[in-house]
Image (tube, rainbow, N blue to C red):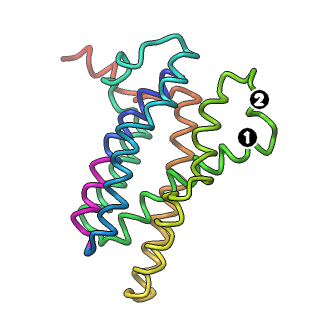
Amino acid sequence: MSFYVGQDYNYLNAFIKVYADAIQKSQTRADMAIFAKQIDFILNSEIHPHHNFCNVAGVEYETLQHEPQAPGTYLYNEHMYRAARTGDLIDVVAAMTPCPWTYLEIANRFVKQGKNTDDNVFKPWIDFYADMEDDSDSILPQLFALIDREAEHYDQHHLDVVKEEFLKSCELEWEFWDQAYHQRSWHFVKPMKQYR
């Protein structure tokens, strides 16, 4: 779990920066507010599930905030950075949306399976993300509506690119979880260090 938290901390730092890029690409204050709210959510609320995992693992949260990026984290971050550097607002949002969407889906699956019981040490994590759907100001409907709205201004070729960005992020989400489960790191970093 500590491996996951260290990597997620890295990922969320990139997520904040890409949301800031989305603010720059926004044409309305309403859109800017969506991304500003998400930055605030990450900085001030999303630390709670991290603390839950750290408590279960018996490690201090602060000790995991300087972990180097593992390969999957690096690839996912670079995917989002590229969307922010080269794409329009729709590209950025398409690359960002799978993260909150998949977390909500995972948490809801656990709820449907009855795994959010008081004796489950992960109940706070499950409840935190499952509650996103009940929030009247939930981010997901806003992000999907923004994608739909922006899609009206693009041709089919660009929309195919947007779809690919979204699906790549879905794949990278899966890879991120798999990387954490297997605690996968760089294969050649340690051998390279001995020759320095």
Residue found farthest to the left? 196
Place of residue 53 in the rendered image (x, y in percent of width and height, measured from the top left): 54, 23
Q: Is residue 175 above or below residue 58?
A: below
Q: What stretch is highlighted in magenta?
A: 16-26
| Position of the N terminus by quadrant | top right
Q: Which of marks 2 and 1 is nearer the N terminus?
A: 1
Q: Which residue extends farthest front?
A: 136
> Residue 153 in magenta?
no
SS class of the residue under badge 1? helix
| Above or below: residue 129 compared with residue 36 | above
CA separation, marks 2 and 1?
10 Å
Mark 2 residue crowding within 10 angstroms, few (<14) / some (14–19) / many (20+): some
Identify residue for label 1. 110
Residue 114 or 3: which is nearer the viewer? 114
Tag in front: 2 or 1: 2
Kindly identify the residue that appears in the image at 48 percent across and 68 percent down. 164
Residue 16 appears left or right of 160: left
Residue ID for mark 2: 117
What is the chief secondary structure element of the magenta stretch?
helix
Q: Quadrant of residue 123?
A: top right
